[in-house]
Amino acid sequence: MLTKQDWDWLAVCSHYQTAVTVQTLLKEGKSMEATAGLESLIEAMGRTEKRALKSQLIRLMLHIIKWKSQPQKPTTSWAISILSARREIEDIQEEVPSLNREFIASIWDKCFQAAVKEANTEMRKVECQLTSLSWSEVFEDEYTLSDGALEDGNFE
């Protein structure tokens, strides 16, 4: 019989293997042990989705910070990263509805601080002067390049 600690370890290492083990236990009629495995699997999958959302939010904020800190140097890759991160966050929220605006608000400040730190490292000589980002700046504002920026060869 697997302990809670065994289930947690298995679920962290492999969602697939955990599901297979649960399936085997169900076929053997061991529903109590299978239930324990399912609980660990659900917890592990939730943590994975939370980490993915947090990572995408930091990436999104990072590129917006760079855009706002270096308005003369916006790049196509920044615009694409902003769109891509927004899409990834929407996809995660579709799969896990509990990772909603309220959840994002709970990790907002920590993600912003991480994004500022990464932005300062990437921008080297330009220090981020932003003290916060609003919801609309992160999720609603448009970040597109003008035709002039493309003519100046600013493709990256």
Image (cartoon, helix red, strand yellow):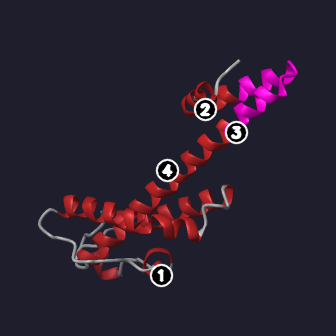
- Give the total number of marks visible in the rendering: 4
User: Position of 37 compared to 48: left or right?
Assistant: right
Question: Main structural element of the magenta stretch: helix, strand or loop?
Answer: helix
Circle 1 SS class: helix
Q: Amino acid at mark 4?
A: Arg
User: Which residue was labeled with disc 2?
Assistant: 11
Closer to us: 149 or 33: 33
Residue at horizontal 71 percent and vertical 17 percent from the top: 1
- The amino acid sitting under disc 2 is Ala
| Residue at the image position 56 percent from the left and 65 percent from the top | 103
As shown in the figure, which amino acid type bears the numbered disc 1?
A: Ser
- Which of marks 2 and 1 precedes in the sequence? 2
Which residue lies under the disc numbered 1?
136
Q: How far across and down, in percent of the image, does residue 15 sit?
A: 63, 33
- Identify the residue position indicated by label 3 in the image: 39
For label 1, count other residues whose C-alpha is less than 10 Å away and answer few (under 14), some (14-19) or many (20+): few
Pair 4/3: label in front: 3
What segment is highlighted magenta in the picture? Answer: 19-39
Query: Which amino acid type corresponds to the residue marked 3 in the rendered image?
Result: Glu
The verdict on residue 35 being magenta is yes
At a point 35% along the width and 80% down the height, the residue shown is 147
- Left or right of 100 in this view: 23: right
Asked whether residue 58 is drawn in magenta, I would say no
Closer mark to the observer between disc 3 and disc 1: 3
* Any part of residue 147 in sight: yes
Q: Position of residue 23 (x, y in %)?
A: 79, 26
> Closer to the N terminus: mark 3 or mark 2?
2
State whether residue 76 appears in this view: no
